[in-house]
Image (cartoon, helix red, strand yellow):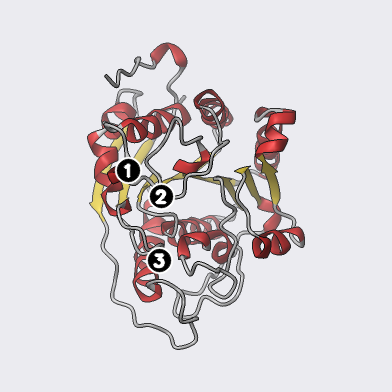
Amino acid sequence: MPSKTIILIGAPVDSGKDRRGCLMGPDAYRTAGLEAALADLGHSVSDLGNLSPVPALPDASMPAHVHAPAETAGWTTVIMASAETAMQTGLPIFLGGDHSLSLGSVAGVASHAAATGRPQFVLWLDAHSDFHTPQSTGSGNLHGTPLGYAAGRAGFYGFPTVTHPVPEANICMIGLRSVDRAEREALQGTQIRRHDMREIDERGIARPLAEFLDMVAGAKGALHVSLDVDFLDPAYAPAVGTTVPGGATIREAHLVMEMICDSGLMTSLDLVELNPFLDDRGRTAQVMVDLAASALGRRVFDRPTQAYS
């Protein structure tokens, strides 16, 4: 694939849920050799280091059970601004951090797409739909809300206004296998494309992805890919606090990334929910680095065999 300017942005967000550990994610990706892997593919890679949240005040309208809303709002503000800026010069990769970082990354890249006259599309690779609002989430964990926020759902008091919501028809979820009743009922009234693991078992993972990528290409859209560790089966990627058995295999995940690469459509990427505290000798971090490399041009003949002994 053509050489790209890739911008690594560390977002050690750990406020989107009450289980700590994702703040170590960005440095785990660096230790696993993400920058070198992408540079070896011929890309120009710059690492901007780790962001810090801006101060934010709690909003009295936010439900009391929501965990750390002011801190997450502060993260959203800084990530949104960083995303808009980075999109002007290259392809940003947001190194998480829990999935609440995507409140900022998706809203930020969507604002840039609107400014350049392109429609924004989102590919959500996750066991969960993350379509809650602060009012609908039973856990109070905001890492379950970023797509709700990016799509323009109401109730995010104290957060930056989403000026360019991503149209529902431009969102595709693949890998679903843990969606609660409130999210399921909300999603049934939308145009969001939803592909759970049963459908993937029946149809394969390539067909629904190809259909979505064809739509993005036809619209000349910008494509944001959000890859959650729990898209993968925990047998391959244990370092996540929301393990759900029955996820994508390593081969399925690489196929997804290779198809994304072949399409040439990806304009930004999230790598989220890596909790190194739960990892096995860095195995999950290495898997995520390998998947990012597949999305940016690495092929099977280029991929080194990993040894974990």
**Is there CB contact under 8 Å for labels 2 and 1?**
yes
Q: Which of the two residues, 1 or 209, is positioned nearer the viewer here?
A: 209
Above or below, 74 against 2 in this view is: below
- What numbered label is drawn on residue 76? 3
Question: Mark 3 or 1 closer to N-term?
Answer: 3
Above or below, 173 against 102 in this view is: above
**Is residue 255 something that shows in the picture?**
yes
Amino acid, disc 3 = Thr
Mark-to-mark CA distance, 3 and 2: 21 Å
Q: Which residue is pictured at 63% across the width and 43% down the height?
A: 220
Q: Secondary structure at mark 3?
A: helix
Q: Which residue is pictured at 70% across the width and 64% down the height?
A: 186
Q: Secondary structure at mark 1?
A: helix
- What numbered label is drawn on residue 241? 2
- What numbered label is drawn on residue 278? 1
Amino acid, disc 1 = Leu
Decide if residue 201 is on the left or right side of residue 96.
Answer: right
Residue 197, given in percent of the width and then of the height, sits at 65, 38
Q: Which of the two residues, 263 or 225, is positioned nearer the viewer here?
A: 225
Amino acid, disc 2 = Gly
Decide if residue 127 is on the left or right side of residue 89.
Answer: right
